Amino acid sequence: MSKKDKNTAILLLHCPDQRGIVAAVTEFIDSNGGNILNLDEHVDRDAGHFFMRVEWALEGFSIPEEKISEYFRTIVAHKFNLSFEVKMKKAVPRVALFVSKYAHCFFDILSRYESKEWKIDIPLIISNHEKFDYIGKRYDIPYYHFPINKTNKAKQEEEEYLLLKKYNVDFIVLARYMQVLSQDFCRRFENKIINIHHSSLPAFAGANPYRAAYERGVKLVGATAHYVTPDLDAGPIIYQDVISISHLDSVSDMKRKGKDIEKIVLANAVWAHINHRIITCKNRTVVFS
Amino acid sequence: MSKKDKNTAILLLHCPDQRGIVAAVTEFIDSNGGNILNLDEHVDRDAGHFFMRVEWALEGFSIPEEKISEYFRTIVAHKFNLSFEVKMKKAVPRVALFVSKYAHCFFDILSRYESKEWKIDIPLIISNHEKFDYIGKRYDIPYYHFPINKTNKAKQEEEEYLLLKKYNVDFIVLARYMQVLSQDFCRRFENKIINIHHSSLPAFAGANPYRAAYERGVKLVGATAHYVTPDLDAGPIIYQDVISISHLDSVSDMKRKGKDIEKIVLANAVWAHINHRIITCKNRTVVFS
Amino acid sequence: MSKKDKNTAILLLHCPDQRGIVAAVTEFIDSNGGNILNLDEHVDRDAGHFFMRVEWALEGFSIPEEKISEYFRTIVAHKFNLSFEVKMKKAVPRVALFVSKYAHCFFDILSRYESKEWKIDIPLIISNHEKFDYIGKRYDIPYYHFPINKTNKAKQEEEEYLLLKKYNVDFIVLARYMQVLSQDFCRRFENKIINIHHSSLPAFAGANPYRAAYERGVKLVGATAHYVTPDLDAGPIIYQDVISISHLDSVSDMKRKGKDIEKIVLANAVWAHINHRIITCKNRTVVFS
Amino acid sequence: MSKKDKNTAILLLHCPDQRGIVAAVTEFIDSNGGNILNLDEHVDRDAGHFFMRVEWALEGFSIPEEKISEYFRTIVAHKFNLSFEVKMKKAVPRVALFVSKYAHCFFDILSRYESKEWKIDIPLIISNHEKFDYIGKRYDIPYYHFPINKTNKAKQEEEEYLLLKKYNVDFIVLARYMQVLSQDFCRRFENKIINIHHSSLPAFAGANPYRAAYERGVKLVGATAHYVTPDLDAGPIIYQDVISISHLDSVSDMKRKGKDIEKIVLANAVWAHINHRIITCKNRTVVFS
């Protein structure tokens, strides 16, 4: 069995900046027989806040996997008023895909799933359109069609919520899902819904960003992957990128070129999420690389 | 004498899209003995508008330089309702630099001027601060200090205007000039004032864009060079670029990294302007490459 | 029927630089009732060579589609010693995909095909492995398995050649096909085979470029799409891009990140090819944008 | 006095990967009253090597500045077979500039120096040409002219070496210095000479990279900042970047565009060096961000 096949624990934590945290955390791991494989810490001096990600080998670590959280809380976390999460590298995340009529992000994620570039499970697909039902069948993934209108939205979202619970979903990816989620729904999945917006936020939030970009005459178009919050297109940004455009690009050229940047930006954000590299604090993210 | 030393004429034109313009323009040049060196045309189908830039060798061209505009208007332009300009490659543009207290764009432009990377004249520098007076002396460029406050703004701008006329200035570069120009002043120099804004517009217009970028938690910061119009930070965009940032970058890191992108973006825009590559129409630019 | 649905003709031409070509070509189109939609020309002054791409509406054009080549040769081309091609926008290109065991480029192309982002036909898939036979079945595209070894290579390539002829293939895309094609095969499909190499050529030609990039300690990795010639990894480059990497990236990280840049670079090259935007001359390309 | 004005210590270390290093280093700092401000560590698993950079506040640290190295060696380093350096943030690096006839990198560095964007001293300039003697006078920096030919090279370099010692130079920047340094000279300043090469190495090493890039028909040109070693253009790479080019770019366009990328890449490398962010090992760099 190679090193890569062995399990590791990943600890994500943040708290107000103070002395001695790094020493306390590394002491906790080291004194219990854990070998640190990666350690990243960051102090946001403008905000006076401390962030850390540390990964260690579980082989020879004396605390059982399921007890690590409890022990860490007791021995370290309470001293520093830490917020933290412990993740196991080997746990396979369960992702629900939400999709409408655009194929590019949806197909790209399925390609990464099918080729095992990403180790994820996709227990279900949810859509407000029937269009991609055949894709669900192709991959043997249950495809649920929830048409949404003003009248039925709350009810449909409640059913979606129950399904997501039933399927034990870890997080949701909106693969160009063209429906605004209700504030209640967003609150139920805080930092667990990743959306791709087809502009470099905060520019061109809302509908038709490429048309707006054309009208303003910008020379770059971009995409933004962010966690969804009750405020539309205003959640914590995970990843962004842009491409150069020129006067030669019509709105439809921007849309076409934008597809590529959208799918790559979304994929980078999902990759960071499934590798437990993101800490969110005050509507901003720390994304450890 | 190499080809590069010979003079050429550059014709920039635009009009509502219609048949036969390219043929008429090329026929005008060809039939009068001009050899076309570069021809770029563009039809904006969304707007139904036609743009063209054509450059030809003046050696052997039968119409005298100073008559080209008149002949072109008579023979071609009136038929197509064309807006056009004729420029001579050998004419050296006269640029006024406006500067406040930031050095990076200002020094970068002076470096390109001193090293002859750019063939421009800088007949004067205008500033609302005395700080860089010594730089004016170093380069033997008259440096005019116009302190601006709410009371004297109109009067000071009038004096600046008279100076710019006296020095026969072709265009103005605001090298991080930290004063909003009055609407009247902007109107007097339509498409003749290039500003660098330290964000990727339309995101973070106005003051303190790096602070705002930090607050929003974006993963890119950028810069935008644009022609100044009476609407603040809303003029036609000439060039934009961004760089990736991360949680590691404090506001002061963003400012430091931003300096490099600002000076390069501004330089690209000025280069396009002095090479007569820009046509402005309806608050958008066509920048021929 | 919208403008986009109407057919257009695209003329690609190149020749030693000389006077009057643009005028002659535009006159040919204009005088026969064609409305020029796009015109790009370029003079490579270092090489003394002229390149042009022009597209015009066929509605009202007096020369029948199938006669345009003949008429243009007779009336214009022979005067200027032009090399040229005439393409119809509505013709749907027939593409053969060659694939081995890597999924990312292959799946990406199929996604663009399935979603109709690209209007192409894929009449067959050829592979030296059986792995993706099920993908052929999924898309109802004949999948031909040609295992290659030193002994059978010439024979297998001959059969591939016959198949490609039988299926009337316009061009070939090597979607990370891990077999060097023979020089004879390459010559039979000059400028008709697009390969993606997983480095920014000419750096790291040949096998294992990511390993070599790691060893050299570079801070960028890239991908190159090029036409295949008898010289390995030395054909005319169509498109290249890079991404930043750091010491944090292991060889397997580079491979993973490289997949995204490879598939996007390949897609950009194929897009340029199917839109008749590429002229190849002396192992270099002109790619009109 | 703000936090930024207070002094900090920076420890750079590397060694074969082994357990407990992070804990030992943080314990050393913490138990002696140091408050860790930044900690970055990296394990290169392909090479089995460990790298670390840690910065801590000196206020309240019980070991005197000039003793930190000795104490760290005694208490920690010998246990782990560590290579390490201790740097003080407040120490102002002394940089010798080597220049020939190109202005862009040279002027850019001087601009950063003059504007105090960089806190460095430039005690001398060395050139093989007289061209920029006036610049030395302008900045009141001694300018030494050492014409180099085959006969005098060893002698001239020896005199340069003595000058560099006399001026107590910390490192050297070759700002497009167009002379190959002898192997002896390179060895005397290991990891202390930063060069900018005008290509994305390993592509186009040696002379005339832009001409070679044109001949090969690449679609990107780049620049590489690296430490100089006895092997030409083969030293450890610190920073690289590229820009897109097209068929429109002649060799002279590439040179012009290349200037901007060269000066920015060089500046990024010098910034990393003067902020003690670089560890070199086996011809590769770790550049902490």
Image (cartoon, coloured by chain):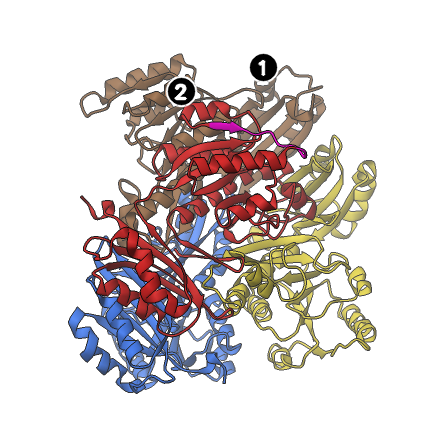
Chain colours: A blue, B brown, C yellow, D red
* Number of marks: 2
Element under disc 1: helix
Region of the chain picked out in magenta, as a range? D143-151
| Residue that carries the numbered disc 2 in the rendered image | B138
Q: Nearer the viewer, residue A243 or A276?
A: A276
Structural distance between the alpha carbons of marks 1 and 2:
36 Å
- Can residue D39 be seen here? yes
Q: To which chain does the residue with label 2 belong?
A: B
Q: Is residue B280 visible?
A: no
Give yes or no for residue C56 being in the magenta stretch.
Answer: no
Image coordinates for residue A6, horizontal then vertical, percent: 43, 82
Q: As drawn, is A153 to the left or to the right of C197?
A: left
Chain letter of disc 1? Answer: B
| A61 relative to D32 in the view: left or right | right
Disc 1 crowd, CA 10 A, few/some/many (<14, 14-19, 20+): few
Tell me which residue sits at (71%, 70%) in the image: C179
Q: Residue furthest top?
A: B166
Residue A120, numbered circle: none
Disc 1 versus disc 2: nearer the observer: 2
* Amino acid type shown at disc 1: Glu
Q: Residue at x 55, y 63 (%)?
A: C214
- The quadrant in which residue A10 appears is bottom left
What type is the residue that disc 2 sits on?
Answer: Arg
Residue A103 in picture, x, y percent from top left: 48, 68
Q: Give the quarter of the figure containing the N terminus of chain C.
A: bottom right
Q: Position of residue A104 (x, y in %)?
A: 49, 66
Q: Which mark is residue B66?
A: 1
C2 or B226, which is in the foreground? Answer: B226
> Would you place residue D87 above or below residue C141 in this image?
above
Q: Nearer the viewer, residue C43 or C257?
A: C257
In this view, B199 is above or below B164: below
Estimate how packed mark 2 is, as few (under 14), some (14 to 19) or many (20 or more) residues with alpha carbons within 10 Å.
few
